[in-house]
């Protein structure tokens, strides 16, 4: 699959490069990074179309013929399962004159028939029939445009890049993290899409730092020690790691960070403790569902994974969270939250959906509000990027990573 060709004037490119060069180290990004349509287009070209994105857990398309359409930036991607069980991702874009081929958001189909002139594509994207075309028309050259797809521990990733970033180390780390939590045998308990009136980077920047957790998330801060500076929770973290080890589990121990500079996808994995006695991310710390993967008991820990520029995972012993950040325009993005539980867990018997989803729903409502407060604030001509706090080291890492990506030739 091809990422769109560069569509920038060299003048705007120079202007963006100057802005990147003028960035004050250790500070937030300047106003244009959140508002300028040219920078948004550059974000898409250099960051979005270059990186891997988690689209879904594969359990949302369990049977041959199952499909779902995902919208990201200006693209619509059909994710489908073919007769042989393989998963395909292709652009919802007819190779005749560009109409949307699939008009339903999800379902089951042996073929996609374009509503315009009825070109017919298989659920692997191959063009099967094109009415009344000349004899020398080559159907094999007019299949739907395919994206690269990888499925790891049940997570389906896509890349729009012609030559995608190397995914092997990410795969290894996902086996060592999500794999220990049995995500390959999980199912989706709930999904929720949030529309946020802010540039996508404001949403991601908010996600990666927990300096705001204390003031903005009283519910989360009651159970998750990450609301405190790391040096203040070392003992808590050590006790948690000892419990994890006692269960015979090695969750890709410690802090792991790989940038994407060397052509490999970026990944950051780290662990932190819940407060003593807290089992999982719930209202009162009590269990929410049956244990997953290799966990025979609760260890009171959380494994957090930041992957590429848009995918974030949170693993608890009894459920998991996938966060997908989706740019939609320069000042609107979406955030999908996906709750995973063990495939054998039954709603009503093993988990209560309202209790399961309570924490991250309240937390995300709070996040949406603070991200939108920030989006309104940075619109001011008097906005001046302030210093990043020591507790925002992941935010600093993210900003530096982003600037490196967006200034790459
Ligand atoms: S645009 Fe799809 S068949 Fe013509
Ligand atoms: Fe938050």
Image: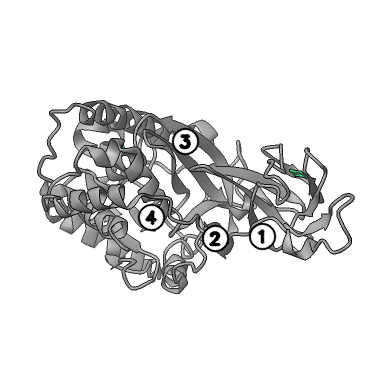
In primary-sequence order, the first of circles 4 and 1 is 4
Judged by depth in the image, the label closer to the viewer, 4 or 1, is 4
Please name the residue shown 77% across and 65% down the image. 140
Mark 1 — residue? Answer: 87
Please name the residue shown 24% across and 46% down the image. 209
In primary-sequence order, the first of circles 2 and 3 is 2
Q: Nearer the viewer, residue 96 or 49?
A: 96
Mark 4: C-beta under 8 Å from nearest atom of ligand 2 = no
Q: Do callouts 2 and 1 mark residues in contact (Cβ within 8 Å)?
A: no
Mark 3 — residue? Answer: 357
Residue 23, image x, y percentages: 15, 50
Residue 301, image x, y percentages: 33, 55
Judged by depth in the image, the label closer to the viewer, 3 or 4, is 4
- In the rendered image, the vertical position of residue 148 relative to residue 381, given as above or below: below
Q: Do callouts 3 and 1 mark residues in contact (Cβ within 8 Å)?
A: no
Please name the residue shown 26% across and 42% down the image. 33
Q: Report how far apart the C-alphas of labels 4 and 1 lie in the structure.
A: 24 Å
Q: Give the position of the C terminus as an image quadrant.
A: bottom left
SS label for mark 1: strand
Mark 4 — residue? Answer: 47
Q: Report how far apart the C-alphas of labels 2 and 1 lie in the structure.
A: 19 Å
> In the rendered view, does 304 fall on the left or right side of 153?
left
For residue 2, the mark is 2
């Amino acid at each position: 699959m091809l990422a769109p060709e560069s569509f920038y004037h060299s003048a705007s490119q120079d202007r963006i490069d100057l802005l990147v060069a003028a960035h004050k180290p250790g500070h937030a990004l300047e106003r244009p990074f959140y508002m300028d349509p040219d920078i948004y287009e550059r974000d898409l070209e250099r960051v979005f179309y270059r990186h891997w994105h988690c689209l879904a857990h594969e359990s949302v398309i369990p049977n041959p013929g199952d499909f779902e359409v995902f919208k990201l930036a200006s693209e619509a991607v059909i994710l489908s399962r073919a007769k042989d069980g393989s998963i395909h991702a292709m652009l919802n874009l007819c190779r005749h004159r560009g109409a949307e081929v699939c008009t339903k958001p999800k379902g089951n189909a042996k073929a996609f028939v374009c509503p315009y002139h009825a070109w017919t594509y298989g659920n692997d994207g191959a063009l099967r029939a094109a009415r009344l075309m000349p004899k020398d028309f080559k159907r094999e050259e007019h299949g739907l445009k395919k994206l690269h797809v990888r499925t790891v521990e049940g997570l389906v990733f896509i890349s729009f890049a012609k030559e995608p970033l190397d995914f092997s180390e990410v795969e290894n780390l996902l086996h060592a993290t999500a794999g220990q939590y049995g995500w390959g045998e999980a199912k989706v308990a709930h999904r929720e899409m949030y529309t946020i009136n802010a540039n996508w980077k404001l949403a991601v920047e908010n996600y990666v730092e927990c300096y705001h957790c204390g003031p903005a998330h009283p519910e989360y801060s009651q159970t998750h020690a990450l609301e405190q500076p790391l040096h203040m929770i070392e003992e808590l973290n050590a006790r948690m790691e000892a419990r994890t080890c006692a269960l015979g589990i090695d969750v890709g121990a410690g802090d792991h960070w790989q940038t994407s500079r060397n052509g490999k996808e970026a990944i950051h994995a780290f662990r932190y403790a819940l407060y003593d006695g807290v089992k999982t991310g719930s209202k009162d710390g009590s269990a929410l569902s049956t244990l997953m993967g290799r966990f025979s008991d609760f260890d009171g820990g959380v494994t957090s994974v930041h992957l590429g520029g848009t995918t974030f995972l949170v693993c608890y012993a009894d459920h998991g969270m996938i966060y997908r950040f989706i740019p939609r325009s320069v000042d609107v993005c979406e955030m999908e939250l996906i709750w995973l539980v063990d495939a054998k867990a039954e709603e009503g018997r093993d988990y209560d959906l309202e209790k399961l989803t309570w924490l991250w729903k309240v937390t995300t409502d709070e996040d949406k509000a603070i991200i939108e407060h920030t989006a309104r604030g940075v619109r001011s001509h008097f906005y001046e990027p302030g210093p990043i706090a020591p507790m925002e080291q992941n935010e600093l890492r993210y900003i530096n990573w982003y600037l490196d990506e967006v200034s790459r030739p």
